[in-house]
Amino acid sequence: MKKHIVVLTGAGVSAESGVKTFRDAGGLWEGHDVMEVASPQGYAANPELVLDFYNQRRRQLFEVKPNSAHVDLAKLETDFKVTIVTQNIDDLHERAGSTHVIHLHGELLKARSTYDKNDIQEWKTDLVLGDLCRKGYQLRPHIVWFGEDVPMITKAMEICETADILVIIGTSMQVYPAAGLMYYVPEGTPVYYIDPNPALSGNDHVTVIAKPATAGVKEMVETYF
């Protein structure tokens, strides 16, 4: 039976593909306070601004491609069972070939009804006011905004409980509830933490690789797997 690797990824794994992260810009996205463009209150105050903001993100997604970290993680499926739990809203893990990906914070290439949160559909073009769900309600980005529940967190916790190996890549371990997932792996599970500015210290169970995602994943695979 293949060992189960659970991989937690954050913005750092996509940064080398050219995907912009708001944390790199001091909490500002394109000059906007994050609460203006990533909260229910911001959407209620100016839905056109929020829709346009995500339209720009979506368009950018078609201009970037997976980097070697995404590809190397996908290749692990040859020898391991691999589940990727990502905070990222891009589809770069899937495009690289990973087949088991859970998006904690939603997906940029999906839209959902403002009336029925379970009415979710694929969406690859601009989303504008007047784009409606099947019941006639406005569609919004399928993104978990600040202050909203994280519907996939329970499933992610259950997956972490089955991990034989935990890999954490490109995340500050500051955003909850995602940051708490590492505490759900069985005691003594080997942990590999890859980040150029690691927020964790190494110990008997935790191996820290203080490098960007592409170099760090390559080193991890070559040295430990």
Image: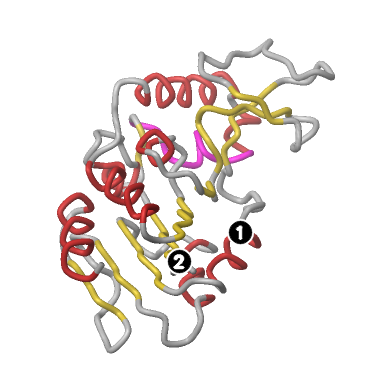
Residue at x-position 54% and y-position 49%: 102
Can you identify the residue that label 1 sits on?
Answer: 153
Q: Extreme top residue here?
A: 130
Residue at x-position 49% and y-position 69%: 1
Q: Amino acid at mark 1?
A: Ile
Figure disc tally: 2
Question: x%, y% of residue 101?
Answer: 50, 47
Residues at circles 2 and 1 in contact by the CB criterion of under 8 Å: no
Question: x%, y% of residue 60?
Answer: 35, 23
The reply, left or right, for residue 166 in relation to residue 150 is: left
* SS category of the residue bearing label 1: helix
Q: Quadrant of residue 135?
A: top right
**Region of the chain picked out in magenta, as a range:** 31-40
* SS category of the residue bearing label 2: loop
Q: Quadrant of residue 95?
A: top left
Q: Amino acid at mark 2?
A: Lys
Q: Quadrant of residue 191?
A: bottom left
Q: Tag 1: Cα neighbours inside 10 Å, few (<14), some, or many (≥20)?
A: some
Q: Nearer the viewer, residue 119 or 164?
A: 164
Can you identify the residue that label 2 sits on?
Answer: 2
Which of the two labelled residues, at mark 2 and mark 1, occupies the earlier sequence position? 2
Q: Extreme front residue here?
A: 1
On screen, 135 above or below 118? above
Question: x%, y% of residue 187?
Answer: 47, 87
Residue at x-position 61% and y-position 51%: 147
Residue at x-position 73% and y-position 28%: 113
